[in-house]
Image: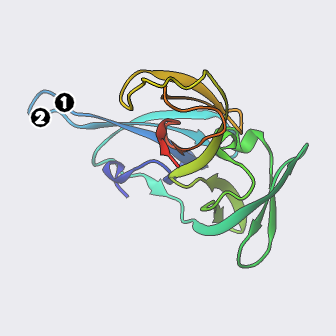
Amino acid sequence: MKANELKRGSLIQEDGQPVKIRQVQVQTSSSRSGNTLYKVRGQNIVSRQKFEKSYKGDDVVTPIEVSRRQIQLLFRDKDGCTFMDNETYEQYVVSDEAIEEELPYMKDGIEGLQALIADDKLLGIELPVSVELEIIECAPAMRAASSSARTKPATLSTGLIVQVPEYLASGETIRVNTENGSFMSRC
């Protein structure tokens, strides 16, 4: 696989360790002979350390063959989160530290969760593109506010804080983008 094929969520092998790609930033050169650089940010799945590296577009990276399995969140306790495979009913316990970036988007009954499994080992959890969460605290709604006007911070049911339009109030459900944590729409 070439570096120009990398995208968010890809799993690659780097120095013998599995790395999950969280962000790919493309930098094009201004000169004719300059190479396009792909700045990759991610996290080592085993050690939980941050990973940053720049690749040229034709550099070869080693992808990890993973199977994606539909799972559901069963419960959360002091050990972490327990997930169940929807087909085999096998259960996986994942520590909170291992999925700290995904936790603010997880709630009971969340649909579209996938487990990334390689060599019968759970490497990580993949969220759907968007989730629906309830606003539990925010400034009062403004009657004259237009939909494209200013925003205000809102605390959601999972503790995540998102900037929302002024016309929204506590108790409403909104759709949130899991890639960047931004408000998408009212549900």
Question: Does the CB distance between marks 1 and 2 fall below 8 Å?
Answer: yes
- Where residue 43 sits, quadrant-wise, is top right
Of all residues shown, which one is farthest toward the bottom?
A: 87
Q: Which mark is residue 162?
A: none
Q: Residues within 10 Å of mark 2 (few under 14, many from 20)?
A: few
Please state which of residues 138 and 124 is positioned toward the viewer in this rendering. Answer: 138
Q: Position of residue 95 (x, y in %)?
A: 80, 46
Q: Position of residue 179 (x, y in %)?
A: 50, 42
Q: Residue at x 71, y 33 (%)?
A: 159
Residue type (three-letter) at the residue carrying disc 2: Ser
Please state which of residues 106 and 146 is positioned toward the viewer in this rendering. Answer: 146
Which residue in the protein does label 1 denote?
Answer: 29
Q: Residues within 10 Å of mark 1 (few under 14, many from 20)?
A: few
Which residue in the protein does label 2 denote?
Answer: 33
Of all residues shown, which one is farthest toward the right?
A: 78
Element marked by disc 1: loop
Q: Is residue 2 above or below residue 89?
A: above
**Number of marks in the rendered image:** 2
Please state which of residues 5 and 105 is positioned toward the viewer in this rendering. Answer: 105
Please state which of residues 158 and 84 is positioned toward the viewer in this rendering. Answer: 158
Select label 1 or label 2 by which is in front.
Answer: 1
Q: Residue at x 61, y 41 (%)?
A: 172
Q: Position of residue 1 (x, y in %)?
A: 38, 58
Residue type (three-letter) at the residue carrying disc 1: Ser
